[in-house]
Amino acid sequence: MARESNFKVELQTQPSSKILNQHETAPRHNSWSLNMLLRRLRATEGKKDDKFSNILDAVGEFGTFQRRLVALTFIPNVLSAVFMFADLFMFTAQKPYCNASWILAVGPNLSEAEQLNLTLPRAPNGSFLTCLMYLPVAWDLASIIQYGLNHTESCHDGWIYPETKQRSLINEFDLVCGKETSTETVQTMFMAGLLIGSLIFGFISDRLGRYPTILLSLLGLIVFGFGTAFVNSFHQYLFFRFAVSQALVGYSISSTSLATEWLVGDHRAHAIILEHCFFAVGVMFLTGLAYSLPHWRMLFLLGGAPVFSFIFYIWILPESPRWLMMKGKVEEAKQVLCYAAGVNKKTIPLSLLDKLQLPGKKMDKASVLDFYNNRHLRKVTLVMGCVWFTVGYSYFTLSFKLKDFGVNIYFRQVIPSIMEVPARLCCIFLLEQMGRKWSLIATLFQGTMMCLLILIIPSELKSALVLMVVFGEFSMAASVTVFFIYTAELLPTVLRATGLGLVSLAWAAGAISSLVLISQSLTLLPVFLCLTSAILALSLCSLLPETQDQPLSDSLESYPLQFRNTGEDTMSDDTLYDDAAEEVVKNTILNASVMKLDTDILPSSSQPTEADRKDD
């Protein structure tokens, strides 16, 4: 007994650093636990001052109301994918011939092959010319067969497509013989709509609210998405595609903002990840429709018809309480929160609701100029814009790279879409274990390595190159999902939608740059630029602060301290905070170790040893 007491006294009088060194040299795996505990400490400290998080906890973190909200936001993403990538299936290869039906007036019983043989000139290889025809003459059929026709002219009565089984834009609007339009050109017009719509709808969402912007976007999908099936000219088609792209980006920005402001913690990230998974499912749904339907109008009719079911969103979609508070609509925010609590069968304490008040001093109205005037917001937006440009450029470059390898259009969409679902689901593990910033760096680094391998692998190894491109798309899809979550958390509520619009503009600019370079039929340059831009994006990611387990910022005035400072100030503040928190955790682990030692000693002390009995 005396020796055990002396051992305990000796243990407790040892310097704490000595004991800590013993623990650090043996179980190195505790370092990861330390980081997790540090995150929890930061989250607890931040949550004390976040009144909205406390109220949302009282409402229910992820009850019936939140599950219904998530379902309402991710279901339209299936149709968003249909409307976004429909252009890829609108330009199936066609073999046109001049319409020479004039000869039927003198030979009504001629077969189609005989018509072509008598009215179309041939190329040196024996094939019919597609853009020329023989000049009609006022002869009888016997004279035409006997003497033949010699004078040619360009097609003036349109074209026929005898070998075509599917109806596409090419044979609908005769986009041949000098009127050719590639998929890249149409998608560039679509991306230009995304670019403009990201600015317009981001501003509208912050000005009018998430709820009306989502309804306006869904109305745009009905009019310009479903309505594309009824266009009468190719120019109308381009206009409708330009307009529907704006509705798509408006819905994406507003739905992401709504989910971000209603959900807390990991539920917020999981909801956005699920939303993106359903987008990939929508691409697979579109590919199946395009493969089975013989007419391009049927694709828009059947693929876009479900959009009419979203009319009931008028009655069940809620507004964001955070946005209502920022606009001074306190009573409306309380009503929405109480309704959500009622759906979840919870009750919000009056003491919490009473704390939901506007600040004592009048808040300045935020505007897009704050992205320039506010030093931190300017820095974060510029960095995010550069990274978003890289992600957009790299994603589209890799997507269109499969076309160079002769991969079928349907496989080019189905295989990457199937791969994107596990890629986005893997983000759940990455975000929980590594946080936002390091998850983004990890996915971008993987995409960078795939671009490097595509440049290094010889062109003869076609299968290996296709595999690298698919894995590159896998990485970029994960980067898009992680960065969407990260961007939404970095921006304050009062300017969240506008900020998402600005970075979406950068993403669209990257996509347009990719489409322009690809249309130049360059081989290695687009991938080389993809590699260099990804390396630049990796270096810029280190300038962004971590947002995991941090409360959302609602106004510019309530921006977290570590978000407002830059450079050495940020590093010093974070270092001091980390050191203090780490010291607390280490002391906790040390005390737990000593208590464990006590429990190990006490049971043995209840049975006296033989030496102790002899001493007695």
Image (cartoon, rainbow, N blue to C red):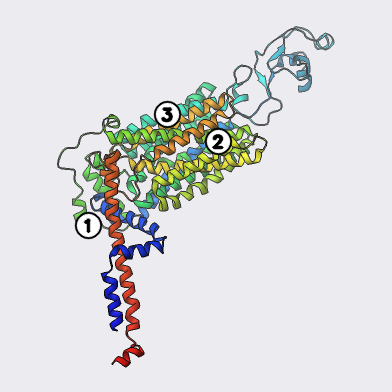
Nearer mark to the viewer, of 1 and 2: 2
Image position of 447 (left or right of 467): left
Q: Disc 1 designates what residue?
A: 349
Residue 494, percent across and down?
Answer: 28, 38
Quadrant of the image for the C terminus? bottom left
Q: Are marks 3 and 2 in contact (CB under 8 Å)?
A: no
Q: Disc 2 designates what residue?
A: 399
Q: Is residue 589 visible?
A: no
Q: Earlier in the sequence, mark 1 or mark 2?
A: 1
**How many numbered marks, from 0 up?**
3
Q: Residue furthest right?
A: 146
Establish if 181 lies above or below 500. above
Task: Identify which amino acid the numbered label 1 is placed on.
Answer: Pro
Task: Identify which amino acid the numbered label 2 is placed on.
Answer: Ser
Residue 193, percent across and down?
Answer: 44, 28
Quadrant of the image for the N terminus? bottom left
Q: Disc 3 designates what residue?
A: 195
Image position of 458 (left or right of 148): left
Seen at 54% across and 22% down, the residue is 234
**Mark 2 residue element:** helix
**Mark 1 residue element:** loop
